[in-house]
Image: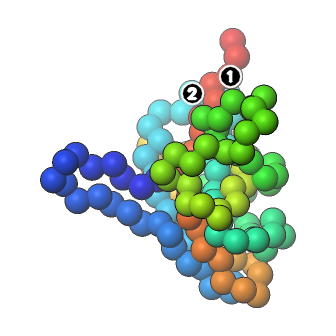
Amino acid sequence: YQDIAPEGGDRYEPLPVASLKNHAATLSQKTGFIPEGATVRVYVGFFGKVKASQITVTNDGSACAFDGEASLPSQNENSTEPPIANGHLPKGSRLYAFTVQDPAKIGDVSYVTVKNDGVLPIIITYLEIEIIPALS
């Protein structure tokens, strides 16, 4: 989610961002065209031990189903190695995956909202949107 800027340019780095009790953080990410029937998965990284019951994730107002703890999509799923530190997922972050329930509502820009339903503040360290086209 951190913008990779050309040499000499300013990088846009909105993360990490904190969300206090009963507050939400909304992050926008350009997704472009999403093919009909595609599965859209949102990966959100949190610093520390954030419980799934402590957060609610929506994408453009559509609820996202919690899929569990995840590794980076670029990592070979059969690997026994820990997730690859690609310079974007800070050390000490826990990564969770969510599936968007109604991806047809997503426009060219996705607005991912992470609501803190817990008592303690949460720190969002990573955001990625994966678009998986339907098999034809």
Location of residue 113 with respect to 123 vertically, above or below: above
Residue 23 falls in image quadrant = bottom right
Location of residue 119 with respect to 38 vertically, above or below: below
Mark 1–mark 2 contact, CB under 8 Å? yes
- Mark 1 closeness class: few <14, some 14–19, many ≥20 residues within 10 Å: few
Residue positioned 75% across, 71% down in the render: 50
- Mark 2 closeness class: few <14, some 14–19, many ≥20 residues within 10 Å: few
Mark closest to the chain's N terminus, 1 or 2: 2
Residue positioned 22% across, 46% down in the render: 6
SS at mark 2 in the image: loop
Identify which residue, 1 or 104, lies in the foreground: 1
Disc 1 versus disc 2: distance between alpha carbons? Answer: 8 Å
Counting from the top left corner in percent of width and height, residue 123 is at 60, 74
Residue positioned 64% across, 69% down in the render: 47
Q: How is the image coloured?
A: rainbow
* Residue type indicated by callout 2: Pro
Counting from the top left corner in percent of width and height, residue 79 is at 75, 32
The residue that mark 1 highlights is 134
SS at mark 1 in the image: loop
Location of residue 114 with respect to 66 vertically, above or below: below
Counting from the top left corner in percent of width and height, residue 84 is at 61, 43
Counting from the top left corner in percent of width and height, residue 90 is at 55, 60
Position of residue 24 in the picture relative to residue 109 (left or right): right
- Residue 65 visible to an observer of this rendering: no
Residue positioned 73% across, 39% down in the render: 81
The residue that mark 2 highlights is 35
Identify which residue, 128 or 64, lies in the foreground: 128
Picture quarter with the C terminus: top right
Position of residue 113 in the picture relative to residue 134 (left or right): left
